[in-house]
Amino acid sequence: MTERRRLLSTADGTSAAAFGPAEWGLMLAPAMMWGSSFVVIAAALETLHPTVITLGRVALGALALSLFPRARRPVDREDHPGLALIGLVWIGIPFLLFPIAQQWVDSSIAGLINGSTPLWVGTIAAIMLRRRPGPLQVAGLLVGFIGVTVITVQSVRVGGQSLFGVGLLVVAAMCYGLAVNLTVPLVQKYGSLAVILRAQVAALVVLTPIGLWGVQFSTANWGGFAALAFLGILSSGFALVFMGELARRTGATRASVTIYIVPVVSVILGAALRDERITVLTLVGGGLVLLGAWSTSRAERARGEVIPPPAPQTIR
């Protein structure tokens, strides 16, 4: 009899090869959606309470995914706790923390702090799997983090951000790091659509009473509805599905490089939509982020080496 999968577990990806067109597409699509989401959240906060934004986006994301038959496939009862935990740490907690924090922190800074997520993913994966990523992947993660740091130093206005808000964003990034790891073995078993839909439903159990409480502090208008539609259907729906599929194929650490592209998108949108200045250091940082993404996407092992089938690993 096989050992029952434990709650805190992750797994290797099904492929250690370099990213192909499909993997690059799965990486860039959610990066574009998430990079845009911080500006959209900032706009939604003008009329909607943070808890309403969180509830609305998760509800719309679940509704969109439920339209796909593969999302409704049955799952084993023993995996329900794991799916509920993913719903809490990937959706419930961080989706609530971001709009709360953005009451005191600029949208561009929120996107930049979110760029630290791959380091949390890599650290947690190393602990769970009891080994570090390959040298090229480690180098890519570090180069990408340096790029995010350069952009952050150039973008942060001294004294203009709330330390409390920044702290909330760091906690959210840590939650993402755990969630991406927990997702890998489950999406390999059931597929990304089924896992993300059930995680969203689990998150709704926690978020519904909180969101309904926030309705009294919100004003309904078409702009708010449009923001929720974008955040729900794209950022909270399909982006999570794409990320889950990439994690299934490449493992949590390599899939997390998606997050390094997010600050680049947020900086470009800041310049295009909010007249924010792009400096030479910002361009240098963006180049380092892209170089880190490319390095992390490379094959993990030398060509010709046999890759054993992935098996879930746990913290014992």
Image: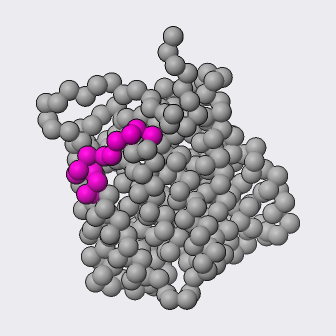
Q: Is residue 5 above or below residue 281?
A: above
Using the image as rendered, state which of residue 172 and residue 270 is in the foreground: 172
Residue at the front extreme, as displayed: 316
Q: Residue, x 65% and y 54% (percent of image)?
A: 93
Magenta part, dominant SS: helix
Using the image as rendered, state which of residue 179 and residue 190 is in the foreground: 179
Residue 311: quarter of image: top left
Using the image as rendered, state which of residue 175 and residue 286 is in the foreground: 175
Residue at the top extreme, as displayed: 1
Q: Is residue 211 left or right of residue 114?
A: right
Using the image as rendered, state which of residue 145 and residue 262 is in the foreground: 145
Q: Is residue 215 left or right of residue 305?
A: right
Q: Residue, x 66% and y 51% (percent of image)?
A: 92
Residue range highlighted in magenta: 128-140
Figure colour scheme: one colour
Picture coordinates of residue 258, whole percent (x, y) = 39, 54
Picture coordinates of residue 120, whole percent (x, y) = 45, 55
Count of labels shown? 0
As for residue 229 lying within the magenta part, the answer is no
Q: Residue, x 41% and y 56% (percent of image)?
A: 118
Residue 302: quarter of image: top left
Picture coordinates of residue 250, whole percent (x, y) = 34, 40
Residue 74 in view here: no
Residue 250 in view here: yes
Q: Residue, x 78% and y 50% (percent of image)?
A: 208
